[in-house]
Image: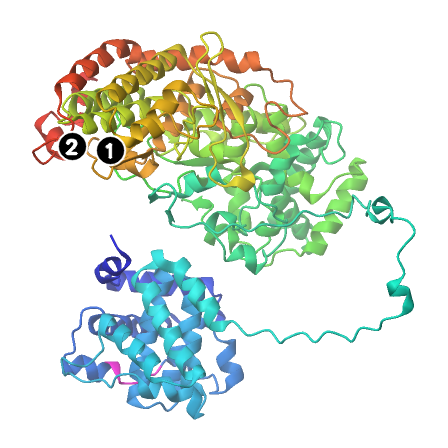
Amino acid sequence: MTENAEESNSKLPLLSRHDFQSLIKDILLLENYPVAEKADTKAKEQLIQNLVMTCLIAQKIVRDGDIETKKIEKIQTAFKINILESIEAKRGELNKLPNLLKLPFLISKFELAPQQIGWTKIAFYLAIVLKHHKLKSYYQRIIKRLKIACFYKTPIKTWILENLPHFSDDPACALQIDSLRDFLVELEIQTNNKTRRNQATEIRLCLEVALNPKRRKKIDRAIKKLNAKRKPRKKKPPQNLSARDFIQPTFQSNPNLNTTDDVENYQPALQTVCFESKDTEQSTASSTEVTVDNTGEPLLEYQTIPNALVRYNAPLQMVDLSVRQMFISQRELMLNSSVYLLSPKAYQLVFARLVKDCQLQEEILSRDQLKLKTLATILLLSMITSIAVESLMTKGFVRQSGIFKLLKTKVYLHASFEITARKKKFEAHIFENEKAEIELPMPIKLVGFLANKRLLPTQTDVRDYIAQVRTELSLPYLSVHRIESALQVSLTRYIEGSNSHIAEIICRIPPISAPAKFYSSHMLNELITHYKNALVWLRKDTSFDLGFLETKKDYTTGSGQALTLSFVKSLLDDIFHTAVITSASKFELFNNVSSYVWLIFCLTTGIRPNNRITHIHDIDLNEYSAQILISDKPNRSVRNHRLVPICPTLVTTLRLYRWFLAKFAQLLHRRKWVNQVIKPILYEHDDSDNMLINLICEQGEKIATVKRGQIAEFIKPFFDIDPYFTRHFVRVQLEKRGVEMPIINGVIGHEKHRQEFFGRYSSGSKSAIYALADVFEAIANDLGLNDIKAKFQKIDKLLHLLPEQSSKPDETLHEKSSKKTKIDATTKTTA
């Protein structure tokens, strides 16, 4: 679809009264508006209802084109907001208000013309829509533009409001979003003044990004160009020439003498990566899990508020105030003797001391003892949850952050694994995991005490308390960071059966540092058991009650995109019998066979299903050590090579596919691309840069490498899922079959920095990788691929019978699959 067609089909989202109400409440909460907390319920409700009604009327006019006279009158009528009555109508007071209330404050407190009131209300509605799309910068931009136009009385500032269309019930009135956009374009053309033209352009770009958020990258560039200032031309200082400048040196200066050797002060450049909602290279929508999997680990600092460059970037670059475990994951790299870790006995002594101070009876405590109990509660809760101490000291964090789920008799620590929601509801025969979240039971007294606490200690109080415990227990290296990382250290190093992967899940390590947790599958009780073992190990020197860990909840949790083995087997069978065998021409057969083999290749290797993953020079089909040396990340700056074994079934499949290519080349030897692409693949030319698996496009005039978006369209009639499910499937199967975690991370490509399987700190060997071929072979047999030779014999017979191109219009896969029994029903009956 072209860009113009995409623009014409775009439309503002239809939001209900409840949607507007929820958005406004959430924005007020996020913008920390203190008046809203102090005000009575009626005043707050009146504020929210006025704003919701404004949005509903503006939506009817701008989105739906409803220009009824009553609505036109209402949109131009001012309203009063009781909460804002006590605030003076001054510039300083206006700037102190949160962004959401600046435009309503102008309407309520300033004498604006009906035209100004109407467009201010519409701008408020558009700001809410932009916030709905999570476009914070544009939300702030449109509010600022209208605030300036209403507050300042100079002609250059008020020009845009005076020149916008007048409100009328005339159908020719340009109030609807498309007409308004066209009107602004004409306004830009007619205006000679650059400042005025920029005002119209800025509002138009806000409208366009509200209509189509996917075009944000292009609009960002336009905004940047709009605000760019010409750099003043640098004046060169005059040259002072002397006789010395014309004398030739008698020797060359030694460059080594001028080389800086200050290694410790050398700092690598910090790269901040922005993620697009659509991956143009793969020609398919890119989920956040895929983006994390393809992106390198960022360099982020442990700090209270992340800098703006990181905070307003892609969601996965964001360091949330609630969960900042990025630094915790780095503890895995240290030896047990490292001063950045405590000894096992030290962790147990600290735990016992914190439990002792927490068990003080609140009713009989003095003021100092109550502060001591509060400090111990915060540190103990951080120790058993890995939540940053600074976060727990934040007012309202326990109740409002969403990490703790407070019920009447139970408290749970809640965390989600899934960023991209799956398209279908859970069915046991299709998906491995029922949910993509964990709920760890928490001690209700500990969390309840902190949740009801109004006066929380300061950082100075925490430092003093840590110093006191450090002196009494003779632990010179005790610090807040060492307490926060205690749970992760115990799970990784001291708990039998646990590992770093379990620690990442329970401690909620951010996905950019631990992408493997999005590809897992575990029972909830299994994770609770590991958690309980860690607490039992920590409470060795105390009587800390673990009765709160008893729960009746149990379900499979982990990746939402992981499919069951039986379903994937049925999916492959259905693709072969519905798509491959029923091909109507040689070209269609070639594409269907290539797509089928591409899926088998991904399902038996776990390689990232990106473009250009079957390069003929990367694949070694040697009988005894078949392997592929792959670098499957599209981003070159983080690309690294790894070794993946090829199982015997996949070796057979790829050899049969080459045999199929040879037959195909014989039958279509007159085609130009046969000599350019297929023959170099068959003869393995050293200078060839071709992929083994390709697709024919442009009605047989061209052949090109497989793209993930093409495979997504190919499997959509059978099951609507991103081809990345192959990677989820392989990782879950390897974990289920008991493969060691370092080998899984090495083959899948989920290694952390300095933990590479063939790195300088590793004892991994190629033989361990080659041994994994037996596991991949077992997966291939369970998928029913042991009869692949019989399938290619059918393909060979069909290849000779079919015409080169079908004379009739090709029957779509949707039509073919509808003739057969649906795959979901088939799998249910077989199960």
Mark 2: give few (<14), some (14-19) or many (20+) Cα within 10 Å. many
Residue 77 relative to residue 583: left or right: right
Indicate the amino acid at tag 2: Leu
Residue 25, compared with residue 587, is above or below; it is: below
Residue 690, compared with residue 326, is above or below; it is: above
Indicate the amino acid at tag 1: Phe
Residue 36 visible in rendering = no
Residue at the (40%, 63%) spot, across then down: 219
User: For residue 279, which quarter of the picture?
Assistant: top left
The location of residue 774, given as percent across then percent down, is 44, 10
The location of residue 186, given as percent across then percent down, is 29, 79
Residue 262 relative to residue 683: left or right: right
Which residue is labeled 2 in the image?
A: 813
Q: Foreground residue, 143 or 572?
A: 572
Residue 621 relative to residue 309: left or right: left
Residue 491 relative to residue 597: left or right: right
Residue 435, compared with residue 462, is above or below; it is: above
Residue 218, compared with residue 186, is above or below; it is: above
Q: Foreground residue, 50 or 549?
A: 50
Q: In the image, is residue 77 part of the stretch drawn in magenta?
A: yes
User: For residue 148, which quarter of the picture?
Assistant: bottom left
Question: Which residue sits furthest top?
Answer: 624
Q: Foreground residue, 262 or 44?
A: 262
Mark sitting on residue 714: 1
- Badge 1 marks a residue whose secondary structure is helix
> Where the C terminus falls, by quadrant?
top left
Q: Which residues are magenta?
A: 75-80
The location of residue 50, given as percent across then percent down, is 30, 75
- Badge 2 marks a residue whose secondary structure is helix
Inter-mark Cα distance, 2 to 1: 8 Å
Question: Are discs 2 and 1 less than 8 Å apart at CB?
Answer: yes
Residue at the (43%, 71%) spot, across then down: 141
